[in-house]
Image: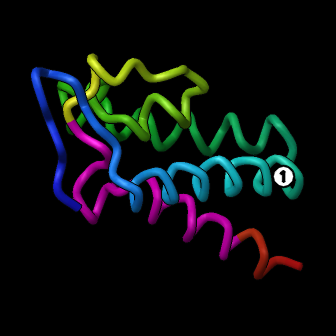
Amino acid sequence: MENNIEKNIFILTEDQKKIELDVKKLLKMIIELSGVNGLSENIGKITSDLKKKYPDFEKYYLYQIIIGSSPHLDDCLYFDFPKEDSIYETLQKGMENLLSKF
């Protein structure tokens, strides 16, 4: 997905808004299945890896969402990390793994 940046203000597309809602739903489902501690451990691992690889990790919108921050659109330059590090895809895979245990 392409980023829309206008006057240094990040603008979410409709697809990105849907993904944001999906990410929030996935986070809630992970809490229901593994508890708050399970979510914290998983998010800690994800964010630790991203911080090592991307010096500008705080400029990613979905990063702000998963750490529980309220992203300021004027601080974000990107929506999600590249495919292999995508927060959305990582959460989807994590949810599939949790569901496979039941």
Q: Is residue 11 left or right of residue 47?
A: left
Query: Magenta stretch mostly in which secondary structure?
Result: helix
* Looking at the image, residue 79 lies above or below residue 77: below
In this rendering, position of residue 48 left or right of residue 65: left
Whether residue 21 is situated above or below residue 92 in the rendered picture: above
Quarter-of-image position of residue 63: top left
| Tally of numbered tags | 1
Tell me the residue at 89%/52% (across/down): 32
The image's colour scheme reads rainbow
Image location of residue 3, percent across then percent down: 18, 47
82 within the magenta span: yes
**Residue visible at 45% across and 28% down?**
64
Give the extent of the magenta segment. Answer: 78-97
Percent x, y for residue 68? Answer: 61, 26
The type of residue carrying mark 1 is: Ser
**Is residue 32 shown in magenta?**
no
Horizontal side of residue 68 vs 10, given as left or right: right
**Quarter holding residue 102:** bottom right
Q: Which residue is mark 1?
A: 34
Give the residue displayed 44% in from the left and 35% down from the top.
47
Horizontal side, residue 90 vs residue 85: left or right: right
Q: Quadrant of the N terminus?
A: bottom left
Q: Secondary structure at mark 1?
A: helix
Q: Position of residue 70 (x, y in %)?
A: 53, 21
Pinpoint residue 14: horizontal percent, then vertical percent. Answer: 40, 57
Q: Relative to residue 24, is residue 96 depicted above or below?
A: below
Query: Residue placed at 78% from the left, 76% from the top?
Result: 99
